[in-house]
């Protein structure tokens, strides 16, 4: 997950009042004379200086809240977030006096990025602003503290980590259902709070010139909101046939495991049977759907355990991949300040995230690492964020972001595509894997269960929220509309009857934490575009799925050139620097999985596909 905006207030902002939405220390009344481009440039320079300190203070409060959940840390973070929201709200309003001026490219981009910088914009009304900050903190706190203590509340209390282990490892349908329903119960108290969040954040969005919060989110992609919706659906149209083929095959195998009564042909798959709490990635059920059992072992997790890999050693392995490309090592402070494992003495948010707390190369990751292949891949993903941070941290703070938010998510993921059997052998985590068609299909299916299976979920989370924010979906229909989209896009259904007492969207971290989600859908597609471009830079010949750029300095130079741009240019410019193309395209993803698709199409002959 990309970090939330974060900050430390400079002395000039100390007087910023939380009790009033009046002009902050930075925002002065517009002069009577017409504003000039020179004033806009000065405004942007001061804005960057102020925001760096504000966001640092915010990041510090958020880090403490996430790694030490208490009422005090939640209240502290809410107070700082309220302060930041007030400042940015006023800065955006003040910046409007430069509308229509012919500005230099950097200033114009900074003012645009300011407008779309807040995923949770503050209402001008101070009472509403305080309520929004408190509501947002409560929602994330409810998620972080969520536990299931059995149907009667008297059993052993289990948190998400423990319940997720059940989802990943159990093959007992009743145990899976118990874990699924238990976790989804923790989000019921969020429902009224989320309704408040929608109303208050929409008020904030309107105060800075957007119809609603969803419109604001879609405005951050260097195209109109309507154009971006069309672009997301175009990309989905490219990959949907591949997803449908995977869905049909997996459903048939699950029917053999659990019986056709539980998994009927031509129907959505029950959500609790796919190995993941949200059925968003299916790699944990690989043993149930493995095409060719008995082939070379792809069990990296067992090797990590056997070889005594602890959390720090796993992170060191991830760092080594980046440094093999000629990129610089992580700073010593990264190793001193990160949270690698779950503390035993307090509640923390285990959801993996990457940080630059001071926007000055104060790199960290926050995880509760276990010696699993999934966590090893996640480490590479989070380090991808940190390497983006470390190559753009000297830019003005408004440019310290990905070219678009999908870029930030795609960097680490692109490098995980180079975690091929050959690389894992080099790392000593796999024995020699004979190159044959059966091994290729096994490995590709394992990858597809994570990367292809995720695509519709990556799209629908924000499709749901955009409809909620716009008012198309009313609070009375939150759950109904959530499951309608999950069925439409994923072909997945709730395993038990759901009502509007439930709030199943809230059982997914990014909803109560208010983190936009389309970035993950874009990242799944962009990572294959990036991978193909890096493989071409490395001089790879042959199938795209066999390429590893590990150790290739030319590929590292191509990557670094894009990382250094940050958000200083529109994303098509950054994409062109990496790939030569100015359009996002799923064709490299289809090319990568071409061997698997041919095999799936053969397997699905005669099956009742679709839902």
Image (cartoon, rainbow, N blue to C red):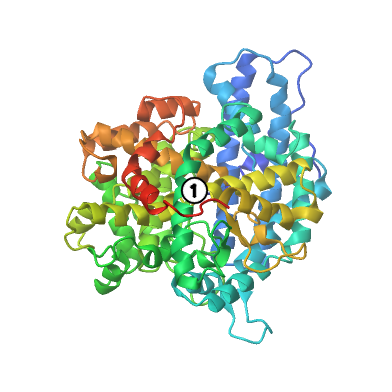
Residue drawn where x is 63% and y is 71% of the image: 181
Up the image or down, 473 lies above or below 116; here it is below
Residue 171 shows in the view: yes
Image coords of residue 160 (percent x, y): 55, 70
Up the image or down, 34 lies above or below 178; here it is above
Q: Is residue 124 left or right of residue 3?
A: right
Judge by depth and name the residue closer to the eye, 145 or 329. Answer: 145
Residue drawn where x is 66% and y is 87% of the image: 154
Counting other residues with Cα less than 10 Å from the Cα at mark 1, is it few (<14), some (14-19), or many (20 or more)?
Answer: some
Q: Quadrant of residue 195?
A: bottom right
Image coords of residue 335 (percent x, y): 36, 59
Q: Quadrant of residue 46?
A: top right
Judge by depth and name the residue closer to the eye, 77 or 200. Answer: 200
Judge by depth and name the residue closer to the eye, 421 or 572. Answer: 421
Judge by depth and name the residue closer to the eye, 366 or 302. Answer: 302
Q: Quadrant of residue 309?
A: bottom left
- SS state under label 1: helix
Find disc 1 in the rendering and name its residue. Answer: 244
Residue 5 shows in the view: no
Image coords of residue 358 (percent x, y): 50, 47
Residue drawn where x is 38% and y is 32% of the image: 562
């Amino acid at each position: 997950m990309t970090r939330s905006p974060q900050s430390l207030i400079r002395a000039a902002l100390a007087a910023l009042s939380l009790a009033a939405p009046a002009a902050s220390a930075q925002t002065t009344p517009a002069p009577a004379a017409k504003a000039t481009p020179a004033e806009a440039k000065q405004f942007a320079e001061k804005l960057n200086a102020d925001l760096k300190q504000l966001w640092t203070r915010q990041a510090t409060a958020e880090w403490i809240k996430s790694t030490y959940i208490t009422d005090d840390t939640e209240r502290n973070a809410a107070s700082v977030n309220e302060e930041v929201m007030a400042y940015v709200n006023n800065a955006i309003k003040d910046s409007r006096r430069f509308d229509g001026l012919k500005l230099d490219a950097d200033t114009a981009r900074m003012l645009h990025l300011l407008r779309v910088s807040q995923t949770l914009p503050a209402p001008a009304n101070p009472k509403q602003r305080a309520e929004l900050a408190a509501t947002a903190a409560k929602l994330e706190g409810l998620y972080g503290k969520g536990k299931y203590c059995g149907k009667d509340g008297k059993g052993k209390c289990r948190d998400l980590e423990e319940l997720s282990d059940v989802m990943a490892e159990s093959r007992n349908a009743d145990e899976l259902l118990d874990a699924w329903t238990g976790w989804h119960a923790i989000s019921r108290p969020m429902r009224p709070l989320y309704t408040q969040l929608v109303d208050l954040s929409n008020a904030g969005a309107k105060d800075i010139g957007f119809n609603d919060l969803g419109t604001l989110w879609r405005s951050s992609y260097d195209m109109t909101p309507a154009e971006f919706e069309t672009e997301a659906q175009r990309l989905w149209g490219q990959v949907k046939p591949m997803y449908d083929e995977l869905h049909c095959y997996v459903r048939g195998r699950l029917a053999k495991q659990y019986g056709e009564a539980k998994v009927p042909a031509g129907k959505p798959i029950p959500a609790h049977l796919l190995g993941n709490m949200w059925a968003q990635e299916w790699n944990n059920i690989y043993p149930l759907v493995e095409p060719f059992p008995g082939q070379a072992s792809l069990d990296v997790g067992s090797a990590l355990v056997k070889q005594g890999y602890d959390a720090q050693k796993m992170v060191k392995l991830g760092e080594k991949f980046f440094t093999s490309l000629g990129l610089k090592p992580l700073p010593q402070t990264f190793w001193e300040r990160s949270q690698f494992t779950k503390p035993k003495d307090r509640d923390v948010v285990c959801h993996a995230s990457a940080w630059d707390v001071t926007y000055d190369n104060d790199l960290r990751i926050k995880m509760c690492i276990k010696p699993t292949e999934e966590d090893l891949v996640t480490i590479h993903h989070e380090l991808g964020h940190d390497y983006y941070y470390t190559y753009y941290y000297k830019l003005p703070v408004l440019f310290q972001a990905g070219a678009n938010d999908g870029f930030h998510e795609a960097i680490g993921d692109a490098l995980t595509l180079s975690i091929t059997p050959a690389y894992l052998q080099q790392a000593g985590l796999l024995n020699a894997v004979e190159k044959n068609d059966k091994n290729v299909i096994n490995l590709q299916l394992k990858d597809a269960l994570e990367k292809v299976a995720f695509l519709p979920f990556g799209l629908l989370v924000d499709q749901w929220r955009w409809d909620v924010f716009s008012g198309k979906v009313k609070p009375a229909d939150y759950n109904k509309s959530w499951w309608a989209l999950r069925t439409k896009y994923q072909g997945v259904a709730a395993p038990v009857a759901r009502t509007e007492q439930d709030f199943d969207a809230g059982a997914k971290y990014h909803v109560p934490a208010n983190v936009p989600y389309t970035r993950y859908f874009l990242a799944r597609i962009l990572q294959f575009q990036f991978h193909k471009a890096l493989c071409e830079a490395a001089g790879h010949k042959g199938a795209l799925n066999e390429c590893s750029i590990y150790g290739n300095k030319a590929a590292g130079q191509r990557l670094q050139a894009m990382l250094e741009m940050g958000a200083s240019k529109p994303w098509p410019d950054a994409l062109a620097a990496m790939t030569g193309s100015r359009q996002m395209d799923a064709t490299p993803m289809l090319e990568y999985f071409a061997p698997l698709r041919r095999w799936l199409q053969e397997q699905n002959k005669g099956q009742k596909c679709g839902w």
